Amino acid sequence: MSDIHFKNVWKTYHDQVVLERLNVNIKAGEFCSIVGASGCGKTTFLKLLLGEEAPSRGTIMLGEQRLRAEPGPDRGIVFQRYSVFPHLTVEDNVLFGLEMSESPILGRLFGRSRQRAKDQAKDMLSAVGLEHACGKYPAELSGGMQQRLALAQALIKQPKILLLDEPFGALDPGIRNDTHKLVLDLWRRFELTVFMITHDLKEGFQMGTRLLVFDKVRNDPQAPHAYGARITYDIPLNSDKRKFPVELTASLERSGSSKTDKKLLDFGPGPE
Amino acid sequence: MKRIINRNPNARVQVLLSLLPFVAVAVIYVFASEARLAENANDKLLPSLDAMFKSLTRLTTVPNKRTGDILLWTDTAASLTRLSWGVSISALLGLFFGILTGAIPYTRSLLSSFIAVLSMIPPMAILPILFIMFDLGELSKVILIVIGIAPFIIRDLQQQVLEIPREQIIKAQTLGASTWQIIARVLLPQLYPRLIQSVRLSLGTAWLFLIAAEAIAATDGLGYRIFLVRRYLAMDVILPYVAWITLLAYLSDTVLLKLSQHISPWFHGTQRKDASA
Ligand SMILES: Nc1ncnc2c1ncn2[C@@H]1O[C@H](COP(=O)(O)OP(=O)(O)OP(=O)(O)O)[C@@H](O)[C@H]1O
Ligand SMILES: [Mg+2]
């Protein structure tokens, strides 16, 4: 298990600065909730962690080493959409990760090794409550089931880091609660480091051990692209959620979510 | 009264409606043919159904005196062989170059404009070149079909690869897949139904080039026969041949659709029968 260090990381697209001067250390095993206005660079932050994008400046360290700028099996991801393979059944979607490592040429397992992998996939599928949907195609699943499948698919590789990009956006409140419990459970069980983007501030508070708020510190109305977002608040959260101040939870509930309400967050350590 | 866009025929009416245009054309033909034949019994333009049936029987049962072949079957075999070679080679090229240019940025830079330009060459314009280079034999006809449809299939599949959500490719990498494994397990299986779709769309074009090639240089084949008997105004042969070609084209289209539904049920939204297995 290794910590993650962002050292003065910038990300620009052409002349648009998306993220600037990110300096943040994340300990292994933390559960970071990420909130921020739409378009401020949260997904970009995940892409940097994933290695899909490289920082324009600065470095990201994973333990003692630079983070490899290519997606790999040590970092799992659940996208908001298109996260599972439409041409594979539920079971094959979960088997996929095992087949990749065990069968480099064909990418398929047969006979006894397939059976072993299948048993493993079965366990994972029951962990997310999908053991009865093994033979279905993703298109035959509800949105929530697809997201749970995506989780199972990612977790079977036992990644050290799990990245979740608004994984619960499409879920109704009931399933949402179940899935929250599931994710927290899996996070504890597999000792993951989790990064979860959410538009729901309350969800962010509830789930994480740490809340990262992304926002632009400076803004030039003449040149909206000149400045990027930074982590404006970095709030350690009680890992025991019940100790969370009741009145704050209530006010969060009232505030709805999506927009980061500065006043509401003013108890945090503030900008660096 | 519901709006007409909301009113759906039931199953039986659907079948009847779909048959109606065929029946209408047949009836109109019979009347027109009878009218012309009543004026001039030797009229060749619109032969009676009876006459067409007779020549069809002759074409499908009586062996040619010189060669012993039964014309319609040898022509069909010759044409279908050329067509299947041409279409299969094009499909393979489409799959190969479609993936090569769709999945790998370097080969895309290398090849995609080249292929785009190649696809603009009018195939018929280079038919003489093919005849000069490959003689009048089978090869030049197959190559004409390939030149005619392969660029379309390649470009279509390249586009299809690019349209597969980037998320899936990233996801596969986070599950430890190599480039080769991504091609074999993510791209290829998702391209099969799209390839079949693409082939179905290019079948009409493939027939066009086949018949053109046969009309110009061949000694058998459906296109060859039609253009041969044109000299004698033998509409009683041409019309059944055209109907036969149409039927073949329609059947191959249907077979391809069924094949696609069989190998990629997920693409067609049909549930697998062993869903709970
Ligand atoms: N590939 C790209 N090329 C150019 N600009 C990009 C690219 N990806 C993202 N951007 C820009 O970066 C900014 C941040 O995008 P990002 O997707 O990270 O936002 P986000 O915080 O995830 O928003 P949302 O909450 O709506 O998902 C946006 O202004 C977007 O236009
Ligand atoms: Mg986003």
Image (tube, coloured by chain):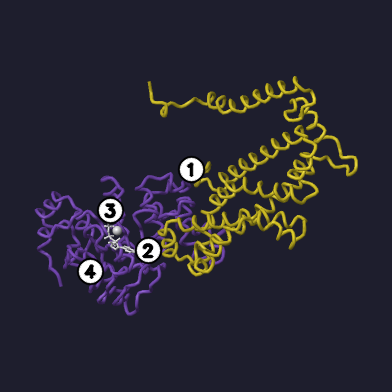
Chain colours: A purple, B yellow
Question: Does B269 sit above or below residue B21?
Answer: below
Question: Does A94 sit above or below residue A158?
Answer: above
Number of other residues with Cα within 10 Å of mark 4, as a class: few under 14, some 14 to 19, many 20 or more: some
Q: Are marks 2 and 1 on the same chain?
A: no
Q: Work out how far the residue at label 3 is from the one at label 1, CA to CA, in angstroms.
A: 32 Å
x and y, in percent, of residue A38 in the image: 24, 57
For label 2, the SS is strand
Q: Which mark is residue B269?
A: 1
Question: Does B276 sit above or below residue A61?
Answer: above
Task: Name the front one of labels 1 and 4.
Answer: 4
Q: Are marks 3 and 1 on the same chain?
A: no
- Work out which quarter of the rendered image holds the C terminus of chain A and state it: bottom left
- Dot 2 corresponds to which residue? A76
Chain of the residue displaying label 3 = A
x and y, in percent, of residue A83 in the image: 39, 55
Chain of the residue displaying label 2 = A
- Dot 4 corresponds to which residue? A226
Q: Work out how far the residue at label 1 is from the one at label 4, CA to CA, in angstroms.
A: 47 Å
- Dot 3 corresponds to which residue? A181
For label 1, the SS is loop
Q: Work out how far the residue at label 2 is from the one at label 1, CA to CA, in angstroms.
A: 28 Å
Q: Callout 4, which amino acid?
A: Ala
Task: Name the front one of labels 2 and 1.
Answer: 1
Q: Verify CB contact (< 8 Å) between mark 1 and mark 4.
A: no
Q: Callout 1, which amino acid?
A: Gly
Q: Verify CB contact (< 8 Å) between mark 3 and mark 2.
A: no
